[in-house]
Amino acid sequence: MDDHPLFVRGLELLLPIATDDRVQVVGATGDAAAAAALVNRCLPDLALVDLHMPAPGGIRAVAAIRRTTPRVRVVAMSGSTDPAPALEALRAGAEGFLPKTSEPEELLPPLLAVLDGWAVLPAELLRAMLRPTHAASVDLDGEERRLLRAIAAGRNTVDIAEELHVSERTVKRMTAALLRKLRVSSRAEAAAVAGHTGLLTE
């Protein structure tokens, strides 16, 4: 979802060639209000959202996509160096963030990593997230720690369900409860908080 046609066209041309047709652009819009409906109609594996689209804006688009099509992975993009919008996007449900570069080729490796189940964040944003937090005092049981380690490793819901010997629905319920306990809004934030506070090593 981007309001710069040349950038979108670059991705449309590059992705099929660079991935042997594994990745294709199936839809695009510069209208943030229409983004969730487009994603719901096309059902892509990944939605790329520019945070600087006109009102209601990219953050609202991310939240709407997450509500209507929760299985679609959402990656936010911005040409700004300000980490605040990126953090807002993660809280709204984005599973990664990429700086918007002038060359679509530079986005290819991180986009493929996201499709393979990884969360991708630039180093500057990760540093902004790694601040002292009240989460250090959170007491997690053994199952919660196993879940958090799996999330931090970028494991998807299916793999986590197999590892913990529970259903996918149970993993989603457990993840929601864990995010509430850590007082964060996304898996990426949970992993960053846990890494900083030592929750993964206690």
Image: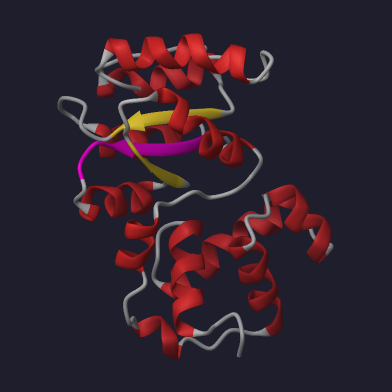
Q: Is residue 108 above or below residue 184?
A: above
Q: Is residue 13 magenta?
A: no
User: Where is residue 118 shown, x and y percent of the image?
Assistant: 59, 48
Task: Check the image and report above or below for 80 versus 119.
Answer: above
Residue positioned 50% across, 75% down in the render: 194
Left or right: 134 in relation to 147: left
Quadrant of the frame with the N terminus: top left
- Magenta span dominant secondary structure: strand
Residue 107 placement (x, y as % from top left)? 46, 32
- The residue closer to the viewer here, 78 or 1, is 78
Q: Say which of 116 and 170 sits in front.
A: 116
The residue that appears at 59% across and 64% down in the rendered structure is 152
Q: Nearer the viewer, residue 150 or 107?
A: 107
Q: Position of residue 144 (x, y in %)?
A: 64, 75
What residue span does the magenta drawing correspond to? 73-80
Q: Is residue 44 left or right of residue 94?
A: right
